[in-house]
Image: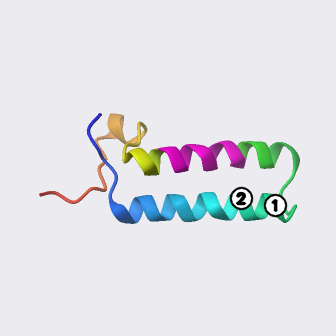
Amino acid sequence: MKKNMGSTDKIIRIILAILVGVLYYTKIIEGTVALVLGALAIIFLLTSFIGFCPLYLPFGISTRKKK
């Protein structure tokens, strides 16, 4: 697994995951929407921590800076 996420991409994903958590905690989102967004938030956190997004691979996308 070659890393393909830059630091800005990681920060944005973490912020979105936290936002979904806050919306759920304050009961602004509930039910099916909360489950779907919660699953996406978990995926965002996991991909942020490992630095690899599988959806970027088929499209050849990389937000990581070239060295």
* Element on which disc 1 rests: helix
The residue positioned 83% from the left and 42% from the top of the image is 32
Q: Which residues are magenta?
A: 37-46
Residue 35's tag is none
* Element on which disc 2 rests: helix
What colour scheme governs how the chains and residues are painted in the rendered image of this protein? rainbow
Q: Position of residue 57 (x, y in %)?
A: 33, 37
Quadrant location of residue 26? bottom right
User: What type is the residue that disc 2 sits on?
Assistant: Gly
Q: Position of residue 19 (x, y in %)?
A: 67, 64
The residue positioned 79% from the left and 48% from the top of the image is 33
The residue tagged 1 is 25
The residue tagged 2 is 21
Q: Is residue 50 left or right of residue 16?
A: left
Q: Is residue 32 left or right of residue 38?
A: right
Q: Is residue 44 left or right of residue 32?
A: left
Compare residues 59 and 19 and report the one nearer the observer.
Answer: 19
Q: Determine if the magenta segment contains residue 52.
A: no
